[in-house]
Image: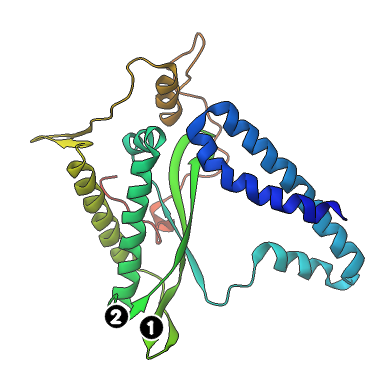
Amino acid sequence: MAAWPCWVPRWSAFTLLTPPAALLSLPILLAARVGLGLGEGVAYPAIFSLYARWVPERERSRAVALLFSGIPREPLRQWVLSVPFALRYLFAVNPAVMGQVLGIVTRAIASHLISAAGYHHDTAQTGAVTLIQRFGSALSLNIHFHMLFLDGVYVTSGERLTFRRLPPPTVAALEKLVHVISQRVGRALERQGILVRDLENSFLAVDTPDGTDFDDLLGHSITYRIALGPHQGRKAFTLQTVPAATDAIDGKLARAAG
């Protein structure tokens, strides 16, 4: 059991080192992920060993459930934002722009929550944490945001903060919010010269080395196509294991331009 306190700081340290390692080189990133795995691999067995020794048998399932689910003081709601293929490629080659877009998205959702509660930014606030996921269910390059927001706002009353819970958002409210996010992201990319519009179309002006193998791999992964070998360029074969979604279950989904 003495190994657990020793490895947990290493887990945290390698987690913090992962983003800068990704900017340096692929081997350094892989080394950081191996270090993270070594720290994480010791922590969970040690936790279960502690539970086996110190938690009564009838209470163990409840203890494990509390460990992995957490006990939030206030209700939370997950917001998921997916982006078009072109933006997935942009985020992959330009993480700084991805960070700017994430800031636009979180500010838009926060403003929506505060407005829906009937308050302003000077009297109410909310909070969120975001997981940037880089792959989809087929392990393709699919950068999207999983955002965990407070399901309400904190209202300032003198020196006290009072939490006001909000009802679930309607489809109409989600569609309006998606259009607001789309417009704000488009304007921000235009100001930086990344998004170029003409009378009929819009396209990204991304400065990347021409003909690099890595860019080619990114493009194939985003569009679910085979990148190497005799079948290069063909659509990857996938197995449909879950029935296709229908409009009847889209009650919590909004789209902008598809």
| Res 83 visible | no
Q: Which residue is drawn at 87% across and 72% down?
A: 58
Left or right: 142, with 193 as reference point: right
Residue with the most extreme left position: 199
- Amino acid bearing label 1: Val
Q: Where does the N terminus fall, quadrant-wise? A: bottom right
Residue 90 lies, in percent from the top left, at 34, 35
Q: Which residue is drawn at 51% across and 35% down?
A: 22
Q: Where does the C terminus fall, quadrant-wise? A: top left
| Quarter of the figure with residue 5 | bottom right
| Res 34 visible | yes
Q: Dot 2 corresponds to which residue?
A: 119
Q: In this view, does 163 lie above or below 212?
A: below
Q: Dot 1 corresponds to which residue?
A: 155
The residue nearer to you, when weighing 34 against 85, is 34
The residue nearer to you, when weighing 236 against 132, is 132
Q: Which residue is drawn at 45% across and 38% down?
A: 142
> Tag 1's secondary structure?
strand
Q: Which residue is drawn at 76% across and 49% down?
A: 7
Q: Are marks 2 and 1 in contact (CB under 8 Å)?
A: yes
Residue 196 lies, in percent from the top left, at 17, 35
